[in-house]
Image: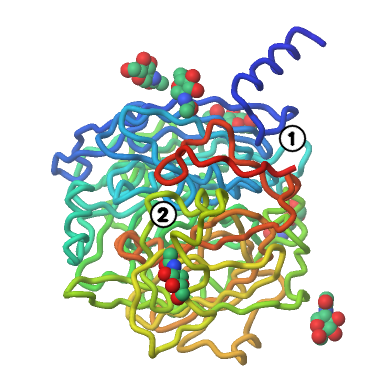
Amino acid sequence: MSRAGVALVLLLSVLGLAAVTAEDPYLFFEWNITYGTISPIGVPQRVILINGQFPGPDINATSNNNVIVNVFNFLDEPFLISWNGVQQRKNSWQDGMAGTNCPILPGQNFTYKFQVKDQIGSFYYFPSLRMHKAAGGYGGLRIHSRLLIPVPFDPPADDYTVMVGDWYNKDHAVLAKILDKGRSIGIPAGILINGKPGKDNDEDPQFVMEAGKVYRYRICNVGIKSSVNFRIQGHSMKLVEMDGSHTVQNLYDSLDVHVGQCYSVLVTADQAPGDYYIVASSRFIKKKELVATAVIRYAGSNTPPSAVLPRAPAGWAWSFNQWRSFRWNLTASAARPNPQGSYHYGNINITRTIKLVSSRVSVDGKTRYALNGVSHVDTETPLKLVEYFGIADKFFNYSIIGDEPTPETPMTIAPNVLNVEFRTYVEIILENPEKSVQAYHLNGYSFFLVGMGPGKWTPESRKTYNSLDAVSRHAVHVFPKSWSAIMLTFDNAGMWNLRSELWERRYLGQQLYISVVSPARSLRDEYNLPETAMLCGSVVGTPKPTPYT
Ligand SMILES: *[C@@H]1O[C@H](CO)[C@@H](O)[C@H](O)[C@H]1NC(C)=O
Ligand SMILES: *[C@@H]1O[C@H](CO)[C@@H](O)[C@H](O)[C@H]1NC(C)=O
Ligand SMILES: *[C@@H]1O[C@H](CO)[C@@H](O)[C@H](O)[C@H]1NC(C)=O
Ligand SMILES: *[C@@H]1O[C@H](CO)[C@@H](O)[C@H](O)[C@H]1NC(C)=O
Ligand SMILES: *[C@@H]1O[C@H](CO)[C@@H](O)[C@H](O)[C@H]1NC(C)=O
Ligand SMILES: *[C@@H]1O[C@H](CO)[C@@H](O)[C@H](O)[C@H]1NC(C)=O
């Protein structure tokens, strides 16, 4: 064996890398999580920094890379990071949710080890506990196609991360306290683009383009409440990718990006040299439109941008029609974003339909949010761990919600865990009886967002599904008083969070976990609990179960 080979084997054994593949390259990161005081919108406040940065550093990966991130928690609270859209195949141990990982305690560190297997596209990471996401701690995560795998467009001259999101000028702990009291955190104070509000400030350009060249912008909505409309003065955007799938390349003047969603667009610098505003504005907040800007500069130019900002479209119908125009490019030969099962998803027989209806309720005078009448609470010992150690029945019952809501049952506050049989093909209907837009995210999978419609879903609604070229993605929005339908094969064993991306709702219970257990207890289906995994609560000192083989 070569010296490099010996070194690699040594390194692997030191790191105890059971869950990563030796052939694929490694990316190593060391992240210090600290508080810092900055004034994103004029008010000094405490934010979460990663290596002193807000937003945090980009992870620039290629399909199948092994990503190793040693996270040091210098906060005064337990902390976890989750990797939005990274499927963590067989590996919910690295998913970084309260239901899957023990938290990194203050002063401690934990090393995430995962492979970005068979995925391409634009994603982000975020702090998953409490209301930390309202304090920053997020950043971009991109996965390039491997060399030799054709990409359905020419390499852009540059590739920009655009983290867009609403922002509250209150500390995350204050926001959590407001919610603990059962009150609302209200509407956000502003919108940020890569941590900055733009506009009145004397803005430096965030992005530079050379005349005639084509640039990729990866736009993710990392906010906690508002859908955002994204547009660029004088330029149209060619949509090429969303949530990890190459799309049919339509041109758009503006895009509605709902919370938790990521879009890649190509922008050609085909206008008169000068500065142009990027505009991101809140959608569907009645009281006021919140607006952020960022400047794109044509290299060498010093013409200031026009003060006249392009306006956002109005109304729901526009947004619905835009969603209907999104199509998966079936001939693009990228790593299939949805490796499970066939992509001829329209021909697979549905084995189970689960209808989840969101609700807002008052319990002892305090607001809670629920799915099918159950408002989730985390267990102190993560759900995945008590399941793995065989003591789940002491902590929760599976599927206490039915596959449809039952109006008679009173609202329950309890750990909400659905079990789904391994490898079955399931249709999930998300129904939103409320007046505001909803957004959901499912960890561990991408799914086909096949349909949306007004009112209540009925089996007849299936006739309106796109059963040919719906985009495979990991985030879904639901318009007010409407439903959305997704379909997927549950072939990724693990414990996976399905949550409202509206953080206030999620914090107050509008989330659940889906337990997918492979009865084979085989390493083919799921990795063992890593040797280095953090243990906490009831599984400390409990004998480990027989490992999978
Ligand atoms: C993280 O903090 C430690 C201790 O303060 C310091 O030694 C190290 O250089 C920091 N690492 C990074 C990447 O900033
Ligand atoms: C990101 O990775 C790609 C593919 O390896 C590479 O071409 C590009 O230069 C990298 N970008 C940065 C900013 O490191
Ligand atoms: C914590 O960081 C140290 C120093 O880099 C490393 O050796 C150790 O493995 C890390 N601990 C965990 C649990 O990842
Ligand atoms: C889909 O991808 C193919 C293959 O890369 C590409 O040639 C084609 O232009 C794309 N089609 C559309 C409609 O975007
Ligand atoms: C789906 O179900 C129908 C009716 O039960 C059956 O005839 C058909 O063969 C099934 N198709 C597949 C792909 O399993
Ligand atoms: C599970 O359900 C049974 C039967 O309703 C109940 O007795 C038990 O307390 C429940 N367990 C938990 C942990 O909630």
Q: In terms of secondary structure, where does tag 1 sit? A: loop
In the figure, is residue 289 to the left or right of 376?
left
Give the alpha-carbon distance from disc 2 to disc 1, as whole Å.
29 Å
Relative vertical location of residue 251 with respect to residue 363 in this rendering, above or below: above
Left or right side of 19 for 209: left
Q: Which mark is residue 198?
A: none
Q: Residue at x 62, y 67 (%)?
A: 420
Q: Residue at x 71, y 51 (%)?
A: 521
Coordinates of residue 417 in the picture (x, y in percent): 49, 65
Q: Quadrant of residue 40?
A: top left
Above or below, 290 relative to 366: above
Q: Residue at x 49, y 49 (%)?
A: 100
Where is the C terminus found, in terms of image quarters? top right
The colour scheme used to paint the residues is rainbow
Q: Is residue 478 visible?
A: no
Q: Which residue does the numbered mark 1 point to in the structure image?
A: 147
Q: Is residue 167 positioned above or below 362 on the image?
A: above
Q: Where does residue 500 sit, x and y in percent of width and height?
A: 41, 64
Asked if residue 108 shows in the view, the reply is yes
